[in-house]
Image (tube, rainbow, N blue to C red):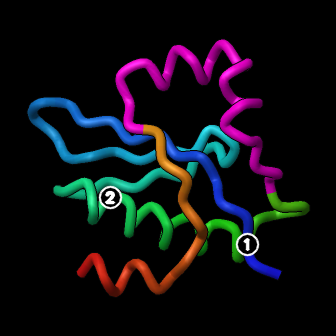
Amino acid sequence: MRDPHYIALIHKDPDSGYGVSFPDVPGVIAVADTLDAAIAQGAAVLAFALEDWPGQRPVPRSLEQLRLDPQFKEAAGDAVVAAILPSPDYYQAAE
């Protein structure tokens, strides 16, 4: 069975890299200099985190479900919203 995708929020401040976070996977983040590298690193970090996740893996919500969450709506206001599949293969592409 293929891993489900997780919704990611990608933020970019003027003086920093692109930061990737996952609303349904707390504490898992990635940072990179470009948007493409941020998505690739996000996929790799997500795969690594889920590989050894304690207990049951977090269940990803759909974008429609997340849009009903006030915290998500606030955090997504100035973010790029992306669907990312956990994959260690992306990391090699980002290097």
Residue 10: x, y in percent?
Answer: 38, 41
Along the line of sight, the residue nearer the viewer: 88 or 35: 35
Q: Which residue is mark 1?
A: 3
Mark 1 burial class by Cα count in 10 Å: few <14, some 14-19, many 20+: few
Amino acid type at circle 2 is: Ala
Of residues 64 and 23, the one nearer the viewer is 64
Please, what is the three-letter code of the amino acid marked with disc 1? Answer: Asp
Q: Position of residue 33 (x, y in %)?
A: 17, 56
- Where disc 1 sits, the SS reads loop
Q: Quadrant of residue 11?
A: top left
Q: Is residue 2 left or right of residue 81?
A: right
* Image position of 52 with respect to 78: above or below: below
* Magenta residues, start to end: 58-80
Residue shown at 38%/37% (left/top)?
Answer: 80
The answer to whether residue 9 is magenta is no
Q: Quadrant of the N terminus?
A: bottom right
Image position, residue 25 (x, y; %): 66, 48
Image quadrant assignment for residue 26:
top right
Q: Which mark is residue 32?
A: none
Above/below status of 8 relative to 48: above
Magenta stretch: residue 75 in it? yes
The answer to which of marks 2 and 1 sits earlier in the sequence is 1
Write down the residue under mark 2.
38
Task: Indicate left or right for 33 with 32 as reference.
Answer: left
